[in-house]
Image (cartoon, grey):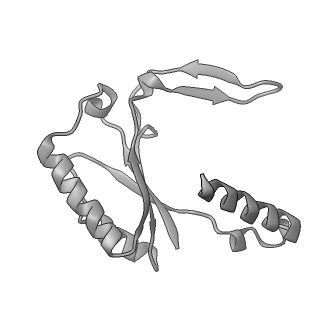
Amino acid sequence: MRFMVIVKASKDTEAGVMPSTELLTAMGKFNEELVKGGVMEAGEGLHPTAKGARIKYGSGQGSVSRGPFPLSGDLVAGFWLINTKSLDEAVEWMQRAPFLDGDEIEIRQVFSAEDFGEALTPELREQEERLRAQAAKK
């Protein structure tokens, strides 16, 4: 099962405050454990929303808003993509992450092709597999 681990933004991440060498070292060690455990597929930190944009869709072309955005529970500061046998295993791994008091993450399962049932026709499935293969080559 694949899970996206969403690291929530904070006042510091939105202000562009970079983590200390100690925290970067601890996070590097944790990422190494994830890789050695065969769990980690990807993981990245994100720049503050001041360097981002949102697009809200309505009729016609989407409406663009540029950051910064107000600090709220829906802002993301980083993510991991992990592969575990269950949500419980994902939680076990992520409870070991070296976060600071007050930091928050969210763990969400990523859809697999099987989750879409008959709506994902053989043609759409083939297209998805082809596009994933092309993207993996880059």
Instruction: Note whether residue 100 is visible.
Output: no
Image spot of residue 78 (x, y percent): 39, 45
Residue in view at x 69 percent, y 70 percent: 115
Q: Is residue 116 left or right of residue 2?
A: right
As drawn, 120 above or below 61: below
Q: Nearer the viewer, residue 64 or 43?
A: 43
Q: Residue at x 46, y 77 (%)?
A: 86
Counting the numbered discs, the total is 0
Q: Give above or below for 121 relative to 11.
A: below
Residue 54 as seen in the image, left or right of residue 42: right
Residue at x 83%, y 63% (from the top left corner): 124
- Residue 10 x %, y %: 30, 36
Residue in the picture at 49% in, 64% down: 3
Q: Is residue 76 visible?
A: yes
Figure quadrant of residue 72: top left
Q: Residue furthest left?
A: 22
The answer to which quarter of the image holds residue 122 is bottom right
Does 53 appear above or below 122? above
Q: Quadrant of residue 133?
A: bottom right
Q: Percent from the top left, x then y, of residue 17?
A: 24, 30
Q: Nearer the viewer, residue 34 or 96?
A: 34
Q: Where is residue 103 drawn, in percent x and y?
A: 26, 47
Please name whichever residue, 126 or 101, is drawn nearer the observer in this view of the structure: 126
The single residue placed furthest to the front in the displayed view is 137
